[in-house]
Image: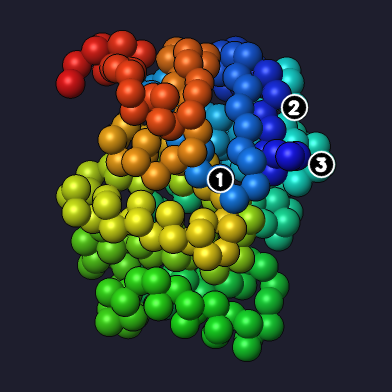
């Protein structure tokens, strides 16, 4: 089976000097949920931004290796072009447009794919079906939402682009366990219903491994371990991050 995404021995540096990631390889099969685990600063966000093309906005660059998506080399592709091809990133920290309403935040994702108004409206109703709480608050400015609701807006906005692959960076950060479970349950059901693939960066290993098929652990910008989620769930991966703390 051909992978939807292949990261092939990439090295990423900022300002041509600061080496953040070295010799990282990973793969996402079609319709899979793949977890990237590791402590804060391990390189997870750098890898994600290298894949989505957003790394260049932070004066970073892929200096070695290559990134393949849907059969094509996207190492130097522009972020907007990748969104149109079905690859979208949900950034760490959610990054909603605080002054815009929930609905306007979601519509921003629909317009990114240059779809017809009828398609956008149908996609919007689909998001409200997944997130009924957002429909109830559709006219509320996003800045007044709870952290969990903002995460739902950020994920919903990404889903409005009709993606094949979603890069979901630290979705559990700062959220209550019940909200985390709700978001991961939606990710799982989206994979089952639509075949959407997810690459999820997480420090919350329990939540990530409960739904993932495969997992990688990053440590100091390198892949320290890889395997199936079941294999990781049966072993102690704390030695690779958080200093072995619980």
Q: CA distance from mark 3 to mark 1?
A: 19 Å
Residue 92 lies, in percent from the top left, at: 40, 43
Q: The N terminus is located in which quarter?
A: top right
Q: What scheme was used to colour the molecule? A: rainbow
Residue 230 against residue 193 in the figure, above or below: above
**Do the residues bearing badges 2 and 3 touch, measured as CB atoms within 8 Å?**
no
- Check disc 1 and report the residue beneath it: 32
Q: In this picture, is 143 found above or below 50?
A: below
Q: Position of residue 135 (x, y in %)?
A: 33, 80
Q: Secondary structure at mark 3?
A: strand
Question: Relative to 150, does residue 62 appear above or below in the rendering?
Answer: above
Q: Nearer the viewer, residue 109 or 197?
A: 197
Disc 3: which residue: 72
In the rendered structure, the answer to whether residue 135 lies left or right of residue 126 reads: left
Residue at 44% x, 21% y is 217
Disc 1 element:
loop
For this rendering, which residue is in front, 208 or 105? 208
Q: Which residue is mark 2?
A: 66
Dot 3 or dot 1, earlier in sequence: 1
Circles 3 and 1: CB atoms closer than 8 Å: no
Quadrant of res 182: bottom left
């Amino acid at each position: 089976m051909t992978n939807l995404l292949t990261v092939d021995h990439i090295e990423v540096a900022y300002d041509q000097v600061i080496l953040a990631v070295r010799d990282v390889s990973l793969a996402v099969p079609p319709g899979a949920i793949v977890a990237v685990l590791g402590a804060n600063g391990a390189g997870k966000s750098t890898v994600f931004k290298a894949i989505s093309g957003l790394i260049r906005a932070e004066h970073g660059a892929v200096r070695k290796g290559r990134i393949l998506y849907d059969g094509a080399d996207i190492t130097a592709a522009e972020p907007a072009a990748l969104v149109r091809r079905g690859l979208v990133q949900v950034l760490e920290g959610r990054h909603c447009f605080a002054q815009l309403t929930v609905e306007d935040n979601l519509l921003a994702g629909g317009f990114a794919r240059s779809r017809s108004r009828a398609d956008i409206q149908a996609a919007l109703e689909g998001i409200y079906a997944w997130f009924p709480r957002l429909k109830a608050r559709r006219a509320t400015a996003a800045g007044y939402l709870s952290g969990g609701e903002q995460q739902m807006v950020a994920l919903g906005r990404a889903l409005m682009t009709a993606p094949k692959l979603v890069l979901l960076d630290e979705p559990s950060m700062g959220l209550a366990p019940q909200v985390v479970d709700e978001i991961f349950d939606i990710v799982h059901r989206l994979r089952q219903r639509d075949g959407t693939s997810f690459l999820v960066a997480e420090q919350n290993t329990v939540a990530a491994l409960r739904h993932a098929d495969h997992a990688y652990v990053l440590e100091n910008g390198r892949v320290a371990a890889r395997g199936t989620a079941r294999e990781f769930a049966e072993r102690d991966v704390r030695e690779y991050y958080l200093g072995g703390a619980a």
